[in-house]
Amino acid sequence: MKSILKTVALAALVGVASVGAASAAPIKMGVAAEPYPPFTSPDASGKWVGWEVDLMNAVCAEAKLECEITPIAWDGLIPALTSKKIDTILSSMSITDERLKTIDFSDKYYNTPASLAGPKEASFTADAAGLKDKILGVQVSTIHAEYAQKHFKDAVSEIKEYQTLDEANNDLAAGRLDAVFADAITLDAFLNSEQGKACCDKKGDVADDPAVLGAGIGFGLRKGDDELKGKLNAAIKAIRDNGTYEKFSKNYFDFDVYGK
Amino acid sequence: MDLSLLALSPPGWGGVLLAGLFSSLQLAVGGYLLGLVIGIGGASGKLYGGPIVRDLLEVYTTLVRAIPELVLILLLYYAGTDLVNQLMHLLGLPSMDISGLAAGIFVIGVVQGAYSTEVLRGAIKAIPAGEIEAARAYGMSPLLTLRRVTLPAMLPYAVPGLSNLWLIATKDTALLAVVGFSELTLVTRQAAGSTKHYMTFFLAAGALYLAVTLVSNVIIGMIEKRARRGMVREA
């Protein structure tokens, strides 16, 4: 652990040094290399689209930063950040105490509840009792995986961890899972798709546990990268105040995704 | 199956797939060539080097061939980049940005190097010792001997093993998908996940990999024919 901390500290130092040296280089935003609608997904021309991409464009325009998207595997995002392959994580990553040990976060830019989806014909409640003896699917290294380990582990017969949420959803549709536990909005996107409509529906939001589910979603940053953090925080606040945030969010949601 | 999904321009994903194939081929060619260079050096070192060089190369080939390539890729991609940047920092240099392509070529090159070391070592040992002795008797330097005698004479023995390695290299590129490098397998998964047409896209990717192999086989056949010129054709 100590050596990891040392590595992180060193990486942070290197980060500070290089920010001074090459401020003209574009800010590399790490995005999980998987379709995660409606936040980030690749389109047929290979471009990344979605709410978070719009957010990035708005924030970077506001902060006068040049930003570019770098796709990285979801569970490699934090190592990529500390080893300087990317400068920022833009991938619906929740701000949790566990992650704050290794990396830093900007202020939150959205916050949504966590909910359960299951097959239409099954009816159960969104808690441990409802999940008794069921097979539950989650995405690896997410707050939902941790929440499931903490609250559902004893009740369910198995927790299956998937590399991408997309794969978990497919297994739910194929009947290999009894339930999928994930972010409410992303599950909605699946449940509103052709495949989701045919098989499954939402079973409800789970009880909040701020210690695991975190305080919303922010840009992931290297520790010590305070200059970039300050710029991003100021830009998030500015687009909240001047209505830009609301404007592009309307294209995706009919409620305020920023949360309370 | 909806073939319009494979059209070259959006909303078809064909263009994205071909770009992924191009990345895969870049990785494969780069990694393979690096592997060949390591292999020639490694084989020479193993055959003609001193005891220390030989032991070091033995450690290299044993380690790399013992560890699953997936583990090596994760290790070299994340830990390797971190290590390089720490070194740069200690030397007082600004940290380097290692691109996914460069890291991928390096990883595949290191893996291929270990295997081609062994392939080439075997091939060199198959050369009749008299040919190399004759070269020495003419006063050729070791490098000249390597270029004029050893490499051309071992080629017929090495081509089958090396062509295997090439085909493995083209498919090893798919492992880079785990680190999020946009090669053919990853873009296929993204396309399939976005459109939910898994069958269409995975079959298309399979066809592309097959096409690479078929074209490779023709080229390898030509190389082998040339390498074996002047030799008795075996049945």
Image (cartoon, rainbow, N blue to C red):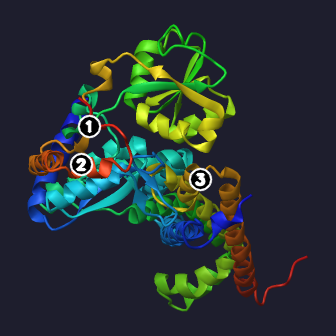
Q: Which one is in front, B153 or A113?
A: A113
Contact, mark 2 vs mark 1 (Cβ under 8 Å): yes
Q: CA distance from mark 2 to mark 1?
A: 9 Å
**Which amino acid type corresponds to the residue marked 2 in the rendered image?**
Tyr
**Disc number lying in front (3 or 1):** 1
Which residue appears at 61% of the width and 86% of the height?
B134
Q: Give the quarter of the image for residue A79.
A: top left
**Which amino acid type corresponds to the residue marked 1 in the rendered image?**
Tyr
Q: Which one is in front, B46 or B200?
A: B200
Residue under label 3: B195
Q: Marks 3 and 1: same chain?
A: no
Q: Which mark is residue B64?
A: none
- Please rate how many residues cluster around mark 1, counting C-alpha atoms within 10 Å: few if below 14, some from 14 to 19, many from 20: some
- Please rate how many residues cluster around mark 2, counting C-alpha atoms within 10 Å: few if below 14, some from 14 to 19, many from 20: many
Q: In terms of secondary structure, where does tag 1 sit?
A: loop
Q: CA distance from mark 3 to mark 1?
A: 28 Å
Image quadrant in which the N terminus of chain B is located: bottom right
Q: CA distance from mark 3 to mark 2?
A: 28 Å
**Which amino acid type corresponds to the residue marked 3 in the rendered image?**
Thr
In the rendered image, the vertical position of residue B190 relative to residue B183, given as above or below? above
Which residue appears at 54% of the width and 58% of the height?
B187
Q: Chain of mark 2?
A: A
Residue under label 1: A258
Q: Position of residue B127 (x, y in %)?
A: 68, 75
Q: In terms of secondary structure, where does tag 3 sit?
A: helix
Q: Position of residue B233 (x, y in %)?
A: 86, 82
Residue under label 2: A245
In the rendered image, the vertical position of residue A49 relative to residue A95, given as above or below? below
N-terminal label among 2 and 1: 2
